[in-house]
Image (cartoon, rainbow, N blue to C red):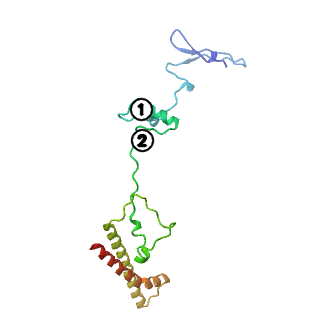
């Protein structure tokens, strides 16, 4: 069908009308009237959601000059890093050091804890991390002492069960065997804690 057949002509009354035509098989198409305000589906604007419309109407940064925004967009299009305002943005702060290094081996003796680890196995702290303060060391020692005393209490409970005739499994037997070493370690840690308090 040619474009002339589907074009609407405006009548003297102001109505739009698509004129009738003859089909290839000989039948006649009727004349069609177009009501006022009608927009054909092909000419309808593409639907845009509220979110899309809101993104289009977002203002630029308050206080930022339009020329500066245009310069930043051009630099971004070229693949360069912006040199002016974006370079003044605050740099991320290094993550705070975790206290897990002081409490990594709560059940080992002080001599074993002081032994150096191989370079591959030792965790590398960041260069800007300050050494542990005396308060942190005190807290870490107190925590180790509490943990060891708890294990010793559990061992004494297991010893009472064993004396009462209860059968202990292998893990419980191993725990009972380690109780003497834990008591020595508690004494060493309490001595270290006494030195820190002085």
Q: Label for residue 87? A: 2
Name the image quarter holding residue 70. Answer: top left
In the rendered view, tell whether residue 66 sits above or below residue 5.
below
- Which residue position holds label 1? 68
The image quadrant where one finds the N terminus is top right
**Residue sitting at 48 percent across and 35 percent down?**
75
Q: Closest to the observer: 186 or 22?
A: 186
In the rendered image, the residue lying farthest to the right is 25
In the rendered image, the residue lying farthest to the left is 198
**Residue sitting at 30 percent across and 73 percent down?**
196
Label 2's element?
Answer: helix
Answer whether labels 1 and 2 touch (C-beta < 8 Å). Answer: no
Q: Closest to the observer: 123 or 154?
A: 123
Label 1's element?
Answer: helix
Q: Earlier in the sequence, mark 1 or mark 2?
A: 1
In percent of width and height, residue 9 lies at 57, 13
Name the image quarter holding residue 131. Answer: bottom left
The image quadrant where one finds the C terminus is bottom left
Q: CA distance from mark 1 to mark 2?
A: 14 Å
In percent of width and height, residue 145 lies at 35, 76
Q: Closest to the observer: 168 or 174?
A: 174
In percent of width and height, residue 25 lies at 73, 19
In percent of width and height, residue 161 lies at 41, 87
10 Å crowding of disc 2: few (<14), some (14-19), many (20+): few
- Nearer the camera: disc 1 or disc 2: 2
10 Å crowding of disc 1: few (<14), some (14-19), many (20+): few
Q: Closest to the observer: 192 or 171?
A: 192
């Amino acid at each position: 069908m040619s474009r002339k057949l589907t074009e609407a002509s405006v009548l003297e009354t102001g109505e739009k009308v698509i004129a009738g035509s003859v089909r290839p098989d000989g039948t006649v198409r009727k004349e069609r009237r177009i009501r006022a305000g009608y927009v054909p589906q092909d000419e309808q604007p593409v639907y845009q959601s509220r979110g899309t419309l809101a993104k289009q109407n977002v203002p630029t940064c308050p206080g930022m000059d339009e020329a500066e925004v245009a310069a930043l967009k051009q630099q971004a299009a070229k693949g360069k890093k912006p040199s002016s305002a974006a370079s003044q943005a605050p740099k991320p702060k290094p993550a705070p050091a975790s206290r897990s290094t002081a409490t990594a081996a709560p059940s080992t003796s002080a001599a074993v804890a002081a032994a150096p680890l191989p370079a591959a196995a030792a965790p590398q702290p960041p260069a800007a991390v300050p050494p542990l303060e005396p308060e942190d060391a005190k807290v870490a020692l107190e925590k180790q002492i509490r943990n060891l005393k708890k294990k010793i209490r559990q061992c004494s409970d297991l010893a009472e069960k064993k004396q009462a005739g209860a059968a202990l499994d292998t893990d419980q037997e191993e725990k009972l065997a380690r109780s003497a070493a834990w008591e020595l370690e508690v004494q060493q840690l309490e001595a270290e804690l006494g030195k820190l308090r002085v």
